[in-house]
């Protein structure tokens, strides 16, 4: 079990706020620097086809100006693969993407798109980019991810975070079983989507989980408490949960 779970901070919604009015403020690169100072291990940004938040120049600046690894969240399209190969982030995460969705609504269907996904993983690997697949905690999808050549999966935690009571316990059990299976077949395990102060501890307590990616909650809570304060508290909660027997 990894002793420390890495915290990736997604800065997409700093760009959402900037784009609501135009101009350059607030700057997601400045947010990334604050995240680094507050204990983040990585910066994640999703360059969408419609450029609804993060823009191409944001990705360039995040890679060039922030002293943290950059995780390029992206659809498996020729355009995005070409941009990722040019920017050369530390890692990439392939996600499903639909123009009409508000946010990523579920995991990538690797079973139905295995050839496309395998080609994308190979093209990114050729450029030295380690690629994760954002998937549901479903054993068949994990097997497909392994066959597609992905070294990492990011388990979709959205349903767990949205559930309550017994349903949340059941979703956590699904995540635990998926994490065990992924590790058993040689996949590194990350997790993300919807995690907040009240949901992160049980996920990072799963011994196979090496990294979590958190964005919307951190940026939203920062409106009230400040970005550095929220990230430091998230870091504290992650470390405390991992330290428990």
Image (cartoon, rainbow, N blue to C red):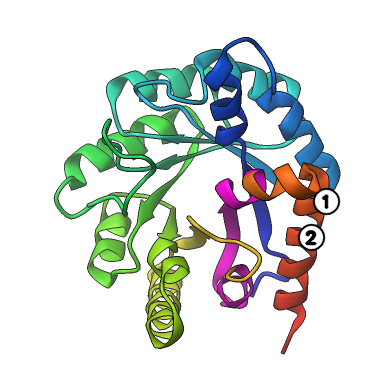
The quadrant of the image that shows the C terminus is bottom right
Q: Is residue 55 above or below residue 16?
A: above
User: Which residue appears at 74% of the width and 21% of the height?
Assistant: 65
Q: Residue at x 30, y 37 (%)?
A: 97
- The residue beneath circle 2 is 233
Residue 222 in the image: x percent, y percent? 72, 45
Badge 2 vs badge 1, beta-carbon distance below 8 Å: yes
The residue lying at 22 percent from left, 52 percent from top is 109
> Where does the magenta region start and end?
200-219
Which quadrant of the view contains residue 125? top left
Label 1, secondary structure: give it. Answer: helix
The answer to whether 159 is drawn above or below residue 108 in the figure is below
Q: For residue 229, which numbered disc appears in the image?
A: 1
Image location of residue 196, percent across then percent down = 60, 61
Per the model, the C-alpha gap separating discs 2 and 1 is 6 Å
The percent position of residue 180, horizontal first and vertical second, equals 44, 78
């Amino acid at each position: 079990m990894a002793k420390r779970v890495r915290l990736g901070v997604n800065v997409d919604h700093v760009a959402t706020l900037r784009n609501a009015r135009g101009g350059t403020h607030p700057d997601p690169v400045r947010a990334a620097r604050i995240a680094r100072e507050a204990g983040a291990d990585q910066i994640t940004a999703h360059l969408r086809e419609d450029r609804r938040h993060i823009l191409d120049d944001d990705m360039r600046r995040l890679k060039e100006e922030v002293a943290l690894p950059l995780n390029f969240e992206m659809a498996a399209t020729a355009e995005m693969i070409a941009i990722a190969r040019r920017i050369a982030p530390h890692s990439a995460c392939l996600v499903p993407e639909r123009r009409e969705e508000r946010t990523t609504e579920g995991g990538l269907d690797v079973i139905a798109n295995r050839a496309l996904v395998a080609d994308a993983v190979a093209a990114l690997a050729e450029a030295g980019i380690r690629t994760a697949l954002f998937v549901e905690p479903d054993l068949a999808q994990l097997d497909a991810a392994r066959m597609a050549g992905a070294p990492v999966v990011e388990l979709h935690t959205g349903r767990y975070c949205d559930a309550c009571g017994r349903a949340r316990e059941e979703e956590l059990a699904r995540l635990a079983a998926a994490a065990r299976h992924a590790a058993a077949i040689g996949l590194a395990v990350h997790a993300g989507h919807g995690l907040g102060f009240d949901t992160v501890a049980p996920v990072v307590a799963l011994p196979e989980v090496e990294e979590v990616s958190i964005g919307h909650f951190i940026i939203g809570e920062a409106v009230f408490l400040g970005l550095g304060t929220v990230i430091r508290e998230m870091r504290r909660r992650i470390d405390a949960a991992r330290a428990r027997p």
